Image: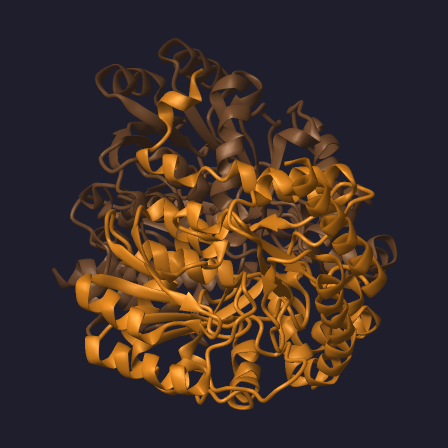
Chain colours: A brown, B orange
Amino acid sequence: MDIDDLLATRTEQMEASAIREILHAASSPGVTSLAGGLPADDSFPLSIMQDLMATVLRRYGGRALQYDASEGFEPLREALVPHLRARGITTRAEEIVVFTGSQGVLDAIGKVLISPGDVVAVEAPTYLGALQAFNPYEPRYVEIETDDEGLVPESLDAVLAANRVKFVYLVPTFQNPTGRTLSLERRRRVAQILQRHDTLLVEDDPYSDLRYSGEPLPPIHSLAPDHVVYISTLSKTFAPGLRIGFCIAPEALRRWLVIARQGVDLHTSTLGQALAAEYVSGGHLERQLPSIIDLYRPRQQAMLDALERHLPEGFRWTRPEGGMFVWVRGPAGLDTEALNRQVLERGVAFVPGKYFYVNQEEGLSTLRMNFTAADPDAIDRAVGIIGVTITESVARY
Amino acid sequence: MDIDDLLATRTEQMEASAIREILHAASSPGVTSLAGGLPADDSFPLSIMQDLMATVLRRYGGRALQYDASEGFEPLREALVPHLRARGITTRAEEIVVFTGSQGVLDAIGKVLISPGDVVAVEAPTYLGALQAFNPYEPRYVEIETDDEGLVPESLDAVLAANRVKFVYLVPTFQNPTGRTLSLERRRRVAQILQRHDTLLVEDDPYSDLRYSGEPLPPIHSLAPDHVVYISTLSKTFAPGLRIGFCIAPEALRRWLVIARQGVDLHTSTLGQALAAEYVSGGHLERQLPSIIDLYRPRQQAMLDALERHLPEGFRWTRPEGGMFVWVRGPAGLDTEALNRQVLERGVAFVPGKYFYVNQEEGLSTLRMNFTAADPDAIDRAVGIIGVTITESVARY
C-alpha cells in the first residue's frame, strides 16, 4: 500500500534526513567524530552501577519494575530538590516532572502550547533538537539576534514587541551549538523583558554543571520563576542512555504537560529513575562531577589550541567556559557542508552549522565542534585534517 | 501569567481528568483495586535482575549508558526476531523499531498519520490509552461493532466502504477492556477486508503471551503483513517499568516513525533495552512466562467464580482465555460510574466501562475488571462488595 498517501500534513515539517545522514556517517568505524554531542564513555560511573542496582532492588523491590506515576518517581523528584537548590533553584518535589530525556519535555511543551502558525522565538543559532521537537506542531519561528555574549536583550525586546510570541526558547549557559553563556547582567534584563511582555520562557539548561572555568551563574528561572519553564537533564552528569530529563513549570502548565506525556509514554522508565534517585541522593553525582570536568577540561583546551594551530586566517571561534561545543565561523563564501563531505573522506566529521539556524543561509560558513567524545590527541589530529582541507580548497580557487 | 491563554487548540482534546482521578483514587492505601492494568509485582523476575545487570555491564560496558540509535538497541532488535518467530511473525531486526512502551508507538503513529479531522476506525469499546495517544492529533473516530467474539468483520467492511479511513486500530487478542479474542476465521476475513480496501491496520498485541487456556492464534500481521503495523511490548512478560515496546511496520512508514520519535525522546533507555536484550536472548522470558501464567490463571478463575457467586441477575461478562481483564455488562439503567464511587467508599475500585467508548453513552452500564493485581481471596472479597452494593442500590429504588 502507498504509505505516502496516508501521511499527515504535519509530517512534511519533520524531514531531517540530511543531519541524520551526517551523524550516521560520523559514527562509522574509523571516523574521528567532532560531530555528535556524546559524553565520553569514560565519564560514566560504570564501577558503581552494580552497587546502585543492588541498592535499588533492596530499597524498592518490585516497585522499580512496576508502572509508576506520569509525574515521575517520587524518590527521584525528592532527590532533585536539594540538587537544584545547590544550583540556585528553590523548588518542591511536586513542581518537578520527570520526562524521557529533556527531549520529552520539549515535545510535551510543543504539543501543549503550539497551534499551527503560532510564533516561537529562538536564538540564531539554536538547538536543533528543540526545532525537531517543535516542528511537528507547525510553529512559525522568529529569530532573536545573538552576539559573542549570547542572546541580545534588545533584540528579544524588539521581537516580543513586534510579534505575538507563544514562548521563547533559550539555552542560556554553554549553548548548543555555540557554547556561549549569557552574562548575569543580560539574564537580569531578559527576566525583566519577559515580565514586562508577560511572555513565557523555556530555559533549557543541560550543560551548566560542565563548567571548566569561571563562576556559576543563576538560571533565569531564579530571576523570573513565574515566567519560566526550566528544563534540565542527567544525560551529561550521569548517563544519557537512561533518558532522564525533567522540568519545573508553573502549575497550570505542568498539569497539561503531565496529561500530554501520559499519551506519549505513560512515564519514564521506573528502573532508570530509581537508579538516578540513588545516584543523586547518594551523593554519587557530586562525587563524579569533578572527574567528568577533569576529563573534559583538557579536551576543550586541546580543541582551542588545535583551532589556533591549524585553522588559517579568517576563522573565529568561541572560547566557552564549559559545555561540550566550540562554534567556528569561517570567512564568507565558505561552504561547511561541502567541507564536511571532504573531511569525512579523510576520517573526520563535524556538524555544518547551518542546521542550527531556522534560516539556514545564515549559517553556511559555520561549524559546530564537539570536544567531549574524543581525546586530546585525536582532537588535534582531526582539527589538523580540517585545517589542511580548508587550505587545500582555498588553494584550488 | 495566564497559561490558559497560551494553550494550543489541540490541548482541548487531551482532557482526561475523570479517568485519572479514578485510577488515582484506586491506588490509595487500603483500596483493593480491580481498576488498573498492572501486572502483579510477583510476576517480575526480581531475583535475576542483579545478574542481568552484571551481564549487561560485562557485555556492553559504557555502551549501555550511552546515547543509542533511534531505531532501537541492536542486540534487542536481534533478540526479538526469534521471539517473534515463535509467535508466528517472520521479520528481520531492521524491521523492528523499539519505542518507550507501546504507548510510544501509538503516539508516533498518531503524529505521522493523523491530520486534524482524519478518520480512525476503532472497536467499540477500545483501548483508552490508544485514544489518549491519538486525541492530540485531532482525529474523528468511527466505531466498528463488536459482539461476544470481538470485532464484527461485516461492520469493518461497512465502515471502510462508507468512510475514508486513515487506519484501523484493533487489539485482536485478549482485548483491553473486554478480554475478547478474534477467532482465526475472523482474522482471515479482517485480513481480506483490509487488503480489499487497501487500508492500514494498527494491530496492538500486548497480551497474547498471557494465555491460560486454548490455542495460540496467528497475529493478523502474519495474514496481511503489508497492511499491518504490529505492536507489542515487554511490559506484561518482563516489567512495565522498563517502558519497552516495539513495532514492525512497512518500510515507508517505519522511516517516518523513527524521525517522529527522534523529536519525542531520541530513543528508548539504552540500559533498559540492554537488560531486555539479555532477558529475551538468555531465555529468561520463556522461563518466566509459565510462572506468570501460573500466577494469573487462578486469579482469573477467582474473578469468574466471584462474578458468578456475587452478581445479581441481569449481569453478563466475558470469559477470556487470557489477558488481564474481564468485561461486565449490567442491566440497562445501571450507572457504573456512580457504582464505582459507592464501592470506593468500601475500599474497592474498578473502571467504569464508558471510558473505553468514543461515544461514552454506549458504555454506561459496563465495568472493566482487572484480575492480575490482586490475589484470589482479595478478588472474591472485592467482587463481593461490588455485588452487595449493587443489590442495596437496586433495593433502594
Residue B311: x %, y % from top left: 70, 57
- Asked where in the image residue B338 lies, by quadrant, the reply is top right
Describe residue B32's horizontal placement relative to residue B116 as left or right. right
- Residue at image point 63% right, 72% down: B274
- Which quadrant of the figure contains the C terminus of chain B? top right
Residue lying furthest right in this view? Answer: A58
Residue lying furthest top in this view? Answer: A196
Front residue of A301 and B240? B240
Q: Can residue A206 be seen in this view?
A: no
Residue A188: x %, y % from top left: 48, 14
Residue B397 higher or lower than A371, as above or below: above
Describe residue B358's horizontal placement relative to residue B355 as left or right. left
- Asked where in the image residue A328 lies, by quadrant, the reply is top left
Describe residue B317's horizontal placement relative to residue B186 as left or right. right
- Residue at image point 73% right, 51% down: B387
Residue A119: x %, y % from top left: 27, 30
- Residue at image point 25% right, 41% down: A358
- Residue at image point 62% right, 64% down: B326
- Asked where in the image residue B288 lies, by quadrant, the reply is bottom right
Q: Is residue A232 visible?
A: yes
Front residue of A80 and A30? A80
Front residue of B395 and A122? B395
Front residue of A225 and B343? B343
- Which quadrant of the figure contains the N terminus of chain B? top left
- How many numbered tags mark residues here? 0
Residue A31 higher or lower than A280, as above or below: below
Residue A354: x %, y % from top left: 26, 48
